[in-house]
Image (tube, rainbow, N blue to C red):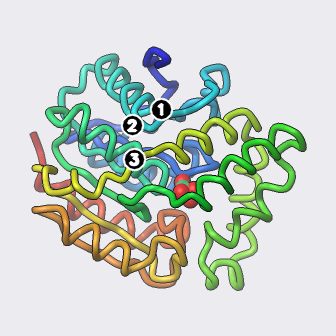
Amino acid sequence: MTEAAVPPATSEGAGSPALVLLHAFPLDGRMWKPQVEALSSHHQVVVPDLRGFGSARDQVVEVAEMDLLADDVARLLDELGLDQVVLCGLSMGGYVSFAFARRHPGRLRGLVLAATKASADDEQAAAARLAMADRVLAEGIGFVPDAMLPQLLGTSTRRLRPTLVEKVTKLIIEQEPAAVAAAQRGMARRPDVTAELAAISVPALVLCGTEDERFGPEVGRGLAAAIPDATFVQIPEAGHLLNLEQPAQVNEALLDFVAPLWI
Ligand code: MLT
């Protein structure tokens, strides 16, 4: 396996516990801007770019395994001198968070799982990921926004908020094809972690958008039910990228969750 490396990251604010925000696919840490702005006056907020994405383009690998990305995050915490943090992952960031909870449980003070799921891909979904990996390497990133946007943004956002649709499109277009391919290969291989959820021993917050067609309320409720100390919060009029679609509600839920967890 590739050796873990410290990912490039921003760190804003001070205040315990530190919150580490892991981005979705195929975006980068800039998707967390509304959370950094609102939360960094209360907590240290750390936002890495995962392998190949954003400012981590020179760290791209062939297959971005979730375990490798989790170990990268642990290296970042070492570098920043952070023993324990609240880790928040959205979708692919959530898959990385599951791997982190398994490999580095002592580093967690709390866990936020947003728009994510514990199950692995079935054969068809894994094959579709590998096909996208091949296509993006052959054709470039241009087709990816159209392929992804209906899954990323809820119907309300797509109908009423063209500026946000444009912003997310721009974020996708700026990513490297090799990063998209590597992440798709890594996600296609990720394990089913359902059996590991009962072992999560820190408080957890499970967030989901009511308009998320793939990771909606049913998935979120199931995830929360399987984790011993979990709170489930639904975000209305949000799809998959709930932190961008309804930042005020997500910020409030994060602050309410994180504040009592001071170290
Ligand atoms: C994401 O938002 O990170 C993706 O939807 C994850 C996935 O493709 O499973």
Nearer to us of marks 2 and 3 is: 3
| 10 Å crowding of disc 2: few (<14), some (14-19), many (20+) | many
For ligand 1, the image quadrant comes to bottom right
102 shown above or below 232? above
Mark seen at residue 10? 1
Nearer to us of marks 3 and 1 is: 3
Residue under label 2: 46
- Disc 2 to disc 3, how far (Cα)? 26 Å
| Residue sticking out furthest to the front | 123
- Residue at 54% over, 39% down: 186
Report whether 110 appears left or right of 131: left
Residues 98 and 123: in front is 123
- Residue at 32% over, 47% down: 98
| Position of residue 223 measured from the top left corner of the image (x, y, whole percent) | 28, 67
Looking at the image, is mark 3 or mark 1 earlier in the sequence? Answer: 1
| Marker count (numbered) | 3
Report whether 165 appears left or right of 96: right
- Say what amino acid the circle numbered 2 marks: Val
| Position of residue 257 measured from the top left corner of the image (x, y, whole percent) | 21, 61
- Disc 2 to disc 1, how far (Cα)? 6 Å
69 shown above or below 229? above
Residue under label 3: 191
Mark seen at residue 115? none
Q: Is mark 1 within 8 Å of ligand 1?
A: no
SS assignment at label 1:
strand
Q: Quadrant of residue 233?
A: bottom left
| Position of residue 51 measured from the top left corner of the image (x, y, whole percent) | 56, 30
